Image (cartoon, rainbow, N blue to C red):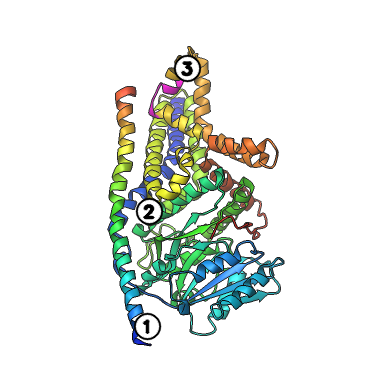
Amino acid sequence: MIADILLVALEYFLLLLVATGAIPVASQAYSFLAIPLHAFINHYKKAAPTLPRVAIVIPAWNEAAVIGSSIDRLMALDYPRNRLRVFVVDDASTDETPQIVERKEQEYPGSVVHLRREKGGQGKAHTLNHGIAIVLQDDWMEALLVMDADVKYQSDSLRRMTRHFADPEVGAVSAYIREGSADKNYLTRFIGVEYVLSQPASRRAQNVLGAQACLAGGAQLHTRENLLAIGGRIDTTSLAEDTVTTFETQLHGRKVVFEPLAIVLAEEPDSIRALWKQRLRWARGNVSVTSRYRKVWFRPSPVHKLGTISFGLIWFSLWLLPVGMVLSSIGLLGLLLLDSEMAALIFRALWISAACTYVFILALGSQTDPRASGTGWREVLTFPGVINMVVMLTAFFPGLVEVDIPALFGLRLTEHGLFILTVCIYVWIPFSMVGAWFAKLVEPTWIGRFLSPLLIYLVGYGSLLCAITVDSYIKELRHAEAKWDKTEKTGRVLA
Amino acid sequence: MSERDDGADDLRERTIMAELQRDRRNEHRLIPQTLIAFAVVAILVVIRQVFFA
């Protein structure tokens, strides 16, 4: 009797574990269902032609490959030249950066200013603050554009951002960072697709929900009032200073608007190791942000919408995605070993909903930037990973993978074989993260040149990001040093 | 500011305003795009129901 009760309790507990895997799926579906509402709930009705005096601050450490063309692009913006000033904060560069910026200073007198820090290496936030302190010394600056040295602005992008400042409630505007390398490889194409899904798609949804998670580090525009309200400087205690700035803006009662049509091109990592380094920094920064704003989550406020349940779900479902996936696999495996009839049923329900959500996300998201999606159409199709797609097919079309396809080759799975296949399918997600980690491990070797891309196509780009998030958990638990590791830029974005 | 500068500013403002109205109208494209995405999912569901139910 007691054994039966315990068994039922265990079954319910395992079901609960499986359900944790449904939370990120539901959160993503909710977020993407909000996108069409942007047709009506957007900030354009409060926008108007506005051309404030903009100070552009560019932190630069050894950016010789990119800084010259970035400045040229800024000077070619369709924006009144007398309302633009570029301040390049050279963070004690040891390459040709100072000489290039000085040449640009002479080429564009009064529009480009070279600021030099003799003692550098403290990170982006410190470098930015050096420039911000100088532009705040007089009242010329009405808006501050913070950008990275490698990003290339399309000529209409800045004026598309400033028009939102016609609404005095807006504190900051972010642009759409599009992966812009001229010589794309499989990884930059995956990043391109990720950026399409996370920016012109997801951030439109965040516009609708009234809360933005993060201003793009390479293209964030603040009003002077907002900059002063958040302390007149960029936070230096976090690796996710962009997110802190975004949160502080909204906590001070000002809106943050994402402008999907202001497009800037950026150079993104072309190797797993470089991507891992960049995203680990972001993930660890987000851990600190989550802890720092612990009193904001799930506490609705009349001042901002960061405390709404919907925003909290979006934030935590991304941050805790690997945990949910692992718990879900444990739950499924447990139910299978208990010989529960629920195992197959709930597996099918979970993966069918995941398949429908992913198809919807990819179909809608890719239309929000057909150009970027077209370049990476292979990566759009394989974004969840080929093996994950097989798992989805198993759930969606029962019998196809286990019976129909083997039958084409005259094969039939035994009961034991079917059990092994089912176990493999149920525990695949945690192993996909191991596969992504292995792809990083072998990347520098000769075999890695072929094996690493193949592994990423098989396990999925999402699994790679989940593996990096897991690494951030481990680093945080070990209290590993959180240092600023700059992503190297080589000038792959052509002006 | 000269009359010519005033004219240029006026032209710029009208251009930006036209662009803004165009961008606002273009956001309505999200509705058919969403319907297409729903249709893709619906096709998958129909295939499942017809051949694998």
In magenta stretch: residue A429: no
Check whether the beta carbons of the residues at disc 2 and disc 1 lie within 8 A of each other.
Answer: no
To which residue does mark 2 refer? A310
- Would you call the spot at circle 1 few (<14 residues within 10 Å), some (14-19), or many (20 or more)? few
Circle nearer the viewer, 2 or 1: 1
Name the image quarter holding residue A434: top right
Whether tag 3 and tag 2 are in contact, CB under 8 A, the answer is no
Q: Nearer the viewer, residue B13 or A413?
A: B13
Expressed as whole percent of the image width and height from the top left, the position of residue A91 reads 66, 70
User: Counting other residues with Cα less than 10 Å from the Cα at mark 3, is it few (<14), some (14-19), or many (20 or more)?
Assistant: some
| Whether marks 3 and 1 lie on the same chain | no
Residue occupied by mark 1: B5
SS for callout 1 = helix
Identify which residue is drawn at 38% across, 51% down: A368
Which element carries disc 2, helix, strand or loop? helix
State the image quarter where residue B23 is shown. Answer: bottom left
Q: Is residue A394 left or right of residue A421?
A: left
Whether residue A403 sits left or right of residue A90 in the image: it is left
In which chain is the residue bearing label 1?
Answer: B
Please provide percent x and percent y for residue B38.
31, 41
Name the residue type under label 1: Asp
Q: Which residues are magenta?
A: A396-402
Residue under pointer 3: A406
Answer above or below: position of B2 versus A463: below
How many circles with numbers are drawn on the protein? 3
Residue type indicated by callout 3: Pro
Q: Mark yes or no: residue A16 visible.
A: yes
**Residue A197 in view, yes or no:** no
The disc label shown at residue A83, or none: none
Q: Nearer the viewer, mark 3 or mark 2?
A: 3
